[in-house]
Amino acid sequence: MRIAIGCDEAAFQLKEIIRQLIESKGHEVRDFGTYDAETKVLYPDIGFAVATCIQRGECERGILICGTGIGMSISANKVDSIRAAVCHDIYSTRRSVLSNNCQIMCMGSRVIGPETAKSMVEEWLTLNYIDGPSTEKIDRITEYEHKTFTCS
């Protein structure tokens, strides 16, 4: 699987741990930075880049990491057809894919530790969305996103 990854300076160390883990599992990683912990970056630029890479089909999934995961999630979700979720434990990680068909996992380096993050990523790599009880909900989101649904 091709996985895009990116972070801001607050999450550089965790990104490097996660990048190495993904590569050790035999996956290809496309790293959108940042590339050190000192250079300040605007996290939306990283979030937009990773989400756009996935939107274009250049990578299947993405991981975005900032201090809380929230800013990266908001940024990635601005890109058409992208679903990004903040994950802070195994349960939210599973539900992000199984119930919500998210392509991007967002994490907070100031919220979870490296071992928890590694466990979440290992689980996430095994998950695939399957049509089921959430399909109608995902379809509704897509309809709204493409302006084919109007609220009454």
Image (cartoon, rainbow, N blue to C red):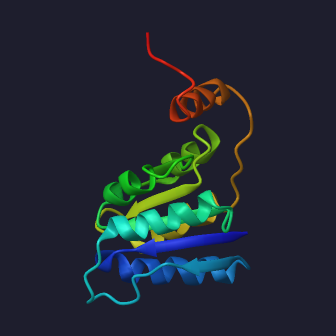
**Residue shown at the point (52%, 46%) measured from the top left:** 91
Quadrant where the C terminus lies? top left
Q: Is residue 72 above or below residue 144?
A: below
Q: Is residue 132 above or below residue 24?
A: above
Describe residue 108's horizontal placement relative to residue 105 as left or right.
Answer: left
Pick the front one: 120 or 39? 39
User: Which residue is situated farthest in the front direction here?
Assistant: 147
Give the quarter of the image for residue 61.
Answer: bottom right
Quadrant where the N terminus lies? bottom right
**Residue shown at the point (36%, 51%) measured from the top left:** 74
x and y percent of residue 135 in the render? Answer: 67, 29
Describe residue 49's horizontal placement relative to residue 57 as left or right.
Answer: left
User: Which residue is situated farthest in the top direction here?
Assistant: 152
Give the quarter of the image for residue 53.
Answer: bottom right
Describe residue 122's horizontal placement relative to residue 106 as left or right.
Answer: right
Q: Is residue 58 above or below residue 81?
A: below
Can residue 86 be seen from the camera position used here? no
x and y percent of residue 39 in the render? Answer: 27, 88
x and y percent of residue 44 in the render? Answer: 35, 64
**Residue shown at the point (54%, 50%) measured from the top left:** 82
Can residue 62 be seen from the camera position used here? yes
Q: Is residue 110 above or below residue 94?
A: below
**Residue shown at the point (62%, 44%) measured from the top left:** 101
